[in-house]
Image (tube, rainbow, N blue to C red):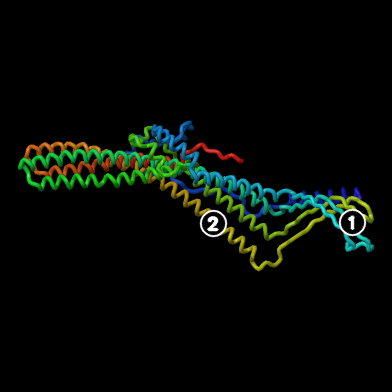
Amino acid sequence: MKHDTHTSLTTLTALAVSLLVTGCVSGENYSMPVLDLPGLWHASETKALPAQVAETSEKPAEKSQPWWSSFHDDDLSALVEKALANNQNRKIAEARILEARASRQSTASALYPQVGISGTANRGNNLGLPTEKPVSLYQAGFDASYEVDLFGGNQRRVEAAEASIQATEAAYQEVSLALTAEVAREYTGYRQLQHLLDLTRKTAESQQKLYDIARTKKAGGIVSGFDVTQSETLLKTTNARIPEIERQLAASGNRLSILLGEAPGAAGDSLKEMKPVPVAESVIALDAPAEIIARRPDIRNAERNLAAATALTGSAISEMYPKITLSALFGIQNTSLSGGGGIWSLGSSLFAPLLNFGRIEGQIKASEARQTQAFHAYKQTVLEALGEVETALSNINKENQTRLALQEAADSAAKTVSASRTRYQSGISDFTEVLQSEQQLYEINSNLVASEAKVSQYIIALYKALGSEINTTVKTE
């Protein structure tokens, strides 16, 4: 008995090893697509690029500080760190990584034997034994089964699961990068609204004085009531802008709070003190397109999805070929008639698809179609990434030009307002001149505040487009 068992085990082991050695993996082995990328950025050819952006042919040295520290704003840094710790979308992305890791663990189990333990106990006279007396039967043992991955179907599924883990990790980095950029953008907008509200209130105070002057002149019979009406209209129009700006400020604070994983309004309460719009002072190293493409997490996500789709196509192809399963049972059996003893069995089974009416062929075609979709999604992601960098560079360049022009216009408009007021008080000009200069100054100053914020927001967009790295890890717990 022992000799037969040993011989059978040796035979089955040799058969399994030979099948594994001679087996092949279905489908094509994945290799990263090679894309035709530009060597330089189109927008970097302009000579008007701001000092914040510097083109370099060398890879920048690793920085210990995150990209948002270049704005030198403690409030911004605190908000970003809080968002990274508490944002709900980021927690969802983190949980998806854990899910993908667990799925890979489950998929990989198919590569190894499955072993179980079983036991039965029966008593009766219908056990197929030549006696009418009740008989007791006890049986316990270990059973094992192993599907030989002859054509690599299980191996391809493990490859796909591994690529899916890497895709979810890249998606986590993508969510983190987008989150930090959105917090910085919203914070910049919040500071812009604070300054616009302050500008509007100060303008209203100045116009209130102008209104008082007009009323005094009318009381003295120097001007008609038309000047008073005009100055009052100007003042009320400016005052009417204040509630709308306050509404926008509250909405911006609520959006910030949600990004931080807090109740709406919490962020606004901590930012009541008005501070300057954050401005980046450090130089942004502009790498070659190929280096940025390799760094962006959304492109890494798309590329890993393509790898997973390629592996699953190979797994689908393996369904066309035979499947071999090895099984074994070792245990003990005891009956009230014959006593106890050891039991064992060894076996193998073969299954090959014969007639499935196109089911497997359809699954292969569907997998190939999904692989094609993943490839084009990857290419589209690369193109969009290149476009984001080009757009951000162009926006920074043009908005800097706009900001400088508005600054000059604001200086000129301030002088015009001062001169028109002096002329009006001296009776040299009418109120229409003052009205026009006041409106022009307010519009230019409000546009200047918006332009300063836009420059910072476009720099934030460039950091995001460049795929600036964020040190984040997900633990398996």
Q: How many marks?
A: 2
Q: In the image, residue 332 lies at what x, y percent?
A: 87, 50
Left or right placement of residue 28 versus residue 180 in this view: right
The C terminus sits in image quarter? top right
Q: In the image, residue 411 lies at what x, y percent?
A: 21, 36
Q: Tell me the quarter of the picture where residue 222 sits.
A: top left
Residue with the mark numbered 1:
136
Give the amino acid type for the residue marked by disc 2 in the picture: Thr
Q: Nearer the viewer, residue 284 or 70?
A: 70
Left or right placement of residue 300 versus residue 282 in this view: right
Q: Secondary structure at mark 2?
A: helix
Q: Tell me the quarter of the picture where residue 258 sits.
A: top left
Left or right placement of residue 363 versus residue 15 in this view: left
Question: Measuring 26% from the left and 46% from the top, which residue is drawn there?
Answer: 241
Question: Measuring 66% from the left and 54% from the top, which residue is drawn there?
Answer: 26
Report the Cα–Cα distance between label 2 and label 1. 62 Å
- Between disc 2 and disc 1, the foreground one is 1
Residue with the mark numbered 2:
372
Q: Secondary structure at mark 1?
A: strand
Left or right placement of residue 451 versus residue 129 in this view: left
Q: In the image, residue 25 lies at what x, y percent?
A: 67, 52
Give the amino acid type for the residue marked by disc 1 in the picture: Ser
Mark nearer the N terminus (2 vs 1) = 1
